[in-house]
Amino acid sequence: MTSPHLLWLLSGVGAILVLASIVGEVLRQRLSPQGGNPVIENLNARITAWWGMVILLAIAFLAGKPGVVLLFALCSFAALREFLTLTTHNRADHWSLLACFFVVLPLQYWFVLTDWYGMYSVFVPVYVFLLLPVLSALRGSTKDFLIRVSETQWALMICVYCVSHVPALLYLQIPGFEGRNVILIAYLIFVVQLSDVLQYVWGKLLGRTKIAPTLSPSKTWEGFIGGALSATAIGTALYWMTPFSPLQAAGLCLMLTLMGFFGGLVMSAIKRDRGVKDWGHLIAGHGGFIDRLDSVIFAAPIFFHVTRYYWSLT
Amino acid sequence: MVTSFPKSRLTRWAASFTGQAISLFARFITAPRAIWQGVEPAQRQRVYFANHSSNGDFVLLWTVLPPALRLQTRPVAALDYWLTSPLRAFIGREVFNAVLIDRRPEARTDDPVAQMTTALDEGASLILFPEGQRNTSDAPLLPFKSGLYHLAKARPDVDLVPVWIANLNKVMPKGEVIPVPLICTLTFGAPLHLGPDEAKEAFLARTAAALLALQPQAPA
C-alpha cells in the first residue's frame, strides 16, 4: 500500500520529528539541564511519544488494509477502556459492558474490514443503540438507568463508531486515485494533528485570550487562529498528493481543523465534569489515547462523509 | 528469589512464563497505573498492605512493581484457598512464591505471624491484605485483623506501605467470571511504623485511616 506520495509524507514527518527532537534537546540543555522544568520535560516526552505513534502508523500502512483496521481497532479498545472508566455503571451493566468490548467493537471493525458500508454506518447508532440497553434492563436495576445507558452509548459512538471511520477511508473509490487511499488517512491525521501541535506552539508563543477558561486553560484565540490557519496553509500546499484541487483542499483543511478543535473542546468538558486532567496515562506526555485522538475522533466521520459524497463512486 | 525447596529448571521456566502471561493479561484488561504518592519505588524491604476487593489484587500490585522489586516481593495468601487445586497451588507457590498462611486457627500447624517474619528475615518484601478476606460489602474497608500489628511489633524497622487499589471491584464484580476492561489505579502512600507504646486498636485504626486516605476522588 505504499505510494511515492506516502513515502514523501512520512519522510516529511520524520524530518519534522528530527528537527523537533533537536530543538527539544537544545531547550533541555539550556533551560532544564537537571530536568527541573516541567514544560520542557513534557515537550520532550511528547516528541518521544510522537516518534512511537508515527512508527506504529507507518508499520500499519505497510501491512495494508488489515494492518490499518487492526491498529485502529486497538486504539478503539484503549479509548473505550479509558472512557468507560469514567462513566456511570453498576453491577447490572456487566454484560452490556462486556458486549461493548468483545462484541460491538470487533463487529464494527469486521464490517469495516469487509467494506459493508450499509452495516457499519448504522450498526452502533441503530442496532446497538436499541439492543444494548435491553441487556442492562434484563438485569433489573433501574437506578440511574437512563444515565447509565446514555453514557455507555456515548462511549461507543466516540471510541468505536467515530474512530472506525479512519480505516473506512481505505475503501472509498475515487476515480484516478485507486490504490492510494492510504494517503487520505495520512492526510487526515497529518492535518488534524499538525493543527493541534501548531495551536500548542502558537498558544505557548502568543497565547493571551482564553477561549473557554472553565474548559481548558491552554486554549487561546491566538493559538487557535494561528494553528488552524497555518495547518490549513500547509495542508493546502500538499493538495498534489490528494484527489482535491487547491481550493477544495483548503476548504477541507479548514473543516478538519475546526472539527478537531471542537473535539478537543467537547472532550475537555467531559474531563472537567469528571474531575480528571487526562483520560489516561499510557502515552507519556500526552495523557491517554482519547487525549491524543479527540480531534481525529471529531474530524474523521465528517471527512469520510464529505469525501464520500463529493468524490467517491460508492 | 527466596525458596523453601529446590525447583527444577523446567518448573522455574514454566513459573516465570506463567507469571509474565498473567501480568500481561492484567495489563491488557486494567492498564494499571501506579501513583507513588508517599514513597519511591526503591530497593528497600517493605510490607505493602492494601485493600482487598478481588482475587486479582495481589496480581495487580505485583504487576506494577518494577521488575527488580517484584522478584523479592511475596504475597501473603490463604493456604485454604490456594492449595485446593494443582493449578492454584502451582500459581500460588511457584509463580508468585506466596507465603501461604492458614486462616483456620483450629487447623493450622504454623503461626502466620511467624511465617511472615521468617520471610522478612530471609530478605523478602511482603504484600498483605489486613482485612483478611475479600471485601464484598458496601463499606470501603473491613476492620483490620490483628496480623499487621503483630508483624509491626515483631519487626518494627520494616516500612509498612499502604496501597489503595481502585476500580478492580468494577472490573470483576462478585459472581462474574469475565473481567470487563477498565483502568485501575494503585496509590502508594507514605510508610508507617508502630509507635512506641502504641496500642493495637490505635495502630490498626491509624493504618486503616492511612490506607483510606489514599482513595482517589470518585468520579461524580
Image (tube, coloured by chain):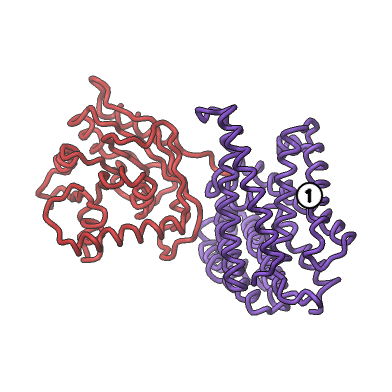
Residue extending farthest top: B196
Check the residue under mark 1 and report the chain it is in: A
Q: In the structure shown, which secondary structural element does the residue marked by tag 1 occupy?
A: helix
Q: Is residue A99 left or right of residue B140?
A: right
For label 1, the residue is: A231
Quarter of the figure with the N terminus of chain A: bottom right
Q: Is residue A115 above or below residue B138?
A: below
Q: Is residue A286 above or below residue A139?
A: above
**Residue B150: quadrant of the picture:** top left
* Whether residue A88 is visible: no
Question: Looking at the picture, which amino acid does disc 1 mark?
Answer: Ala
Task: Identify which residue is drawn at 22% across, 27% down.
Answer: B156
Chain A image colour:
purple
Residue extending farthest left: B109
Quarter of the figure with the C terminus of chain A: bottom right
Q: Chain drawn red, letter?
A: B
Q: Is residue B72 left or right of residue A188?
A: left
Between A183 and A304, the one nearer to me in the picture: A183
Task: Identify which residue is drawn at 15% across, 58% down.
Answer: B7
Between B78 and A234, the one nearer to me in the picture: A234
